[in-house]
Image (cartoon, coloured by chain):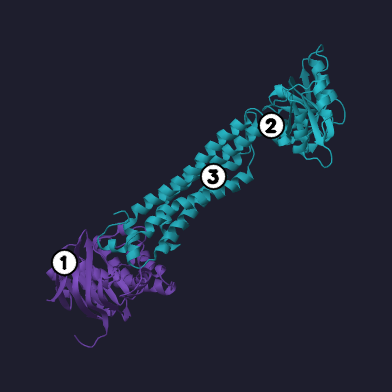
Chain colours: A cyan, B purple
Amino acid sequence: MFLALAEMRRAKARFGMLIVSIALLVFLILYQQSLRNGLLNSFIGAITTQSAPVLVYSVDGQRVIQGSVITPDAEALVASAEGVGEMGRLAQGTFSVTTSEGAFDASLIGYERPSLGAPETLTEGRLPAGPDEAVASDVDAADGFDIGDVVTVQPGGLEIEVVGLAKDAQLNAGPTLFVTYPTYLDAVVAQNPDAGEPPPNVIALAPADGVSDAELVANVNAQSDDLDALTKDDAARETPGVSQIQSSFLIIFALYALVVPCITGLFFLIVTFQKAAALTLLRAVGAPARRLVGALLIQATAILGLGYLLGVLLYAPVSQQRLGGIALSFETTAVVVWALILGAGGLLSSLFAARRVLRIDPIRATTGAGVGA
Amino acid sequence: MNDRPIALDMRDVRKVYRVGDSDIVALDHATLSVERSEMVALVGPSGSGKTTLCSIAGGILSPTEGRIVVGGEDITGHSESQLTSFRQRKVGFVFQSVNLVPFLTARENLLVVDELGRRTGAAARERADELLDDLGLTDRSKNLPSQLSGGQRQRVAIGRALMNDPELVLFDEPTSALDTELGAQVMELIRSEVTSSNTAAIVVTHDERITDYCDRSVNIVDGKLQAA
């Protein structure tokens, strides 16, 4: 401890620069973690937030709600599948709307039964109790989608009042409103009086007692090659673009997970070489190798800890901001998981320097040579 | 010699290095005893085995043959970790080149000796201050080695070597980096500290003038000791 802290005190600039480097990398990692989660939430938050455990698309829809069309025949096939406990229609469309804050393209999701398609939990307010009411995503509250705000569908002028807010319930990275099925139909008619009643896009299902979600999915898919049933989580995961986003970020994160330990390891390796003569001297005058390795690991722990703490302090305020239409949030799980990954990786990489310390031969003190000599 | 206790007793010590297919004898059946408060000059040309002898006496190097006893402790068969502990407890070193830890102040360079073993805390701090005072370095105690002159650095190294009240102090060319006047001052200081601390010392040198400060001289040529 004495050696470790004394060296850090005397070489503030050198150790400080490493701490700042690690802090910036930690900030980047955590910020991108928030960005990734925010991006995914903005694309598929509405699917994970809604209450139906199983969603049935048409195969032609390619797992995009708006692209899927359920014909009456297909609906009947779903209804007759074994294990169906509860069933309801879901429809979704993109509408031009205006609020007190401006004009937007908003997704309206119409559900037939609140238990099959309405948001599972609300952060504020209530579910629609009648026509022309909606639950919005809390992310969009500041854009005129807060409780009490009125959203007007254009053209047509249908006015919908926001009565509740759900957390991270966006679809396609835009404002999203959950409305009852009749309200959805009213919006379609308001926008295009000649449209007639559109077919549902998706059928929402809940399994009967004793039937699992996976069994229900298999039963529905066995009914017809035109039906594409998915559990809620699979529906979110299989939405086009999601896996690409996840795999892209995974590669970025994997690189980060290598870079931080590499920087830490290289730093301590360089420092070990630089102070080779001093370490050799200490070994010669009776310093046990483990004591010198201990000092090195204390420094590595302190630097990683301080760097991480500083990185989190930089990240915390930025994580509360919005990036375009994407709402970021402080990812506590990511902070803990990355602390473990980078801490373990950093300490492991420091062992390369520790190995050099263990190989110091004190006899070199008599010749003035150091670790690498 | 009189009846002062023996601090170092080396008997028939050989050190052989294997280089390729041939053996190089660095130390050939060397026998040497040094008493407490005695200062022995080890004189010889480069490559004669001076540093090897000191390294073996100080437990940095293990002999190929022979027996070494320092302060009553037979270190002949010591393991590496036992030798490390032995060096920490019973030997003081002043090396020819690097002697101080650059990121520690003069006082910390002395205290680090205590930190490496069983810490004594306040007693060590008191001892360090006492040594720095003896060495005329009290006003330099907070200076880093880079802020000290060559002579001051060497004095700090002497203090560090004496910090653990060693049985034996080994000085390897302690004045080689100093001018004549400063070299003489450092040798007087070494003489005085060795006497006052009742420790044994070997001073490796090839400078005949250094021998004047020692009780006796021993020559070494091709690894063989010869009384001067």
Q: Position of residue A183 (x, y in %)?
A: 83, 23
What is the distance, in whole Å, between disc 1 and disc 2 at their CAs?
81 Å
Question: Mark 3 and 2 residues: CB-CB less than 8 Å, in contact?
Answer: no
What is the distance, in whole Å, between disc 3 and disc 2 at their CAs?
29 Å
Q: Can residue B75 be seen by looking at this rendering?
A: yes
> Mark 3: few, some, or many residues within 10 Å (few <14, many ≥20)?
many
- Residue type at numbered disc 2: Ile
Q: Position of residue B205 (x, y in %)?
A: 17, 68
Q: Residue at x 85, y 23 (%)?
A: A182
Label of residue A311 in the image: 3
- Callout 3: chain: A
Q: Is residue A234 left or right of residue B204?
A: right
Label of residue A44 in the image: 2
> What residue did someone put label 1 on?
B48
Above or below residue B145? Residue A184 is: above
Q: Are marks 1 and 2 on the same chain?
A: no
Give the label, 3 or 1, closer to the camera: 1
Question: Mark 3 and 1 residues: CB-CB less than 8 Å, in contact?
Answer: no
Q: Nearer the viewer, residue A257 or A24?
A: A257
Above or below residue A68? Residue B214 is: below
Q: Are marks 3 and 2 on the same chain?
A: yes
Please, which residue is most extreme toward the bottom here?
B3
Q: Is residue A111 left or right of residue A277?
A: right
- Callout 1: chain: B
Quadrant occupied by the N terminus of chain B: bottom left
> Mark 2: few, some, or many residues within 10 Å (few <14, many ≥20)?
many
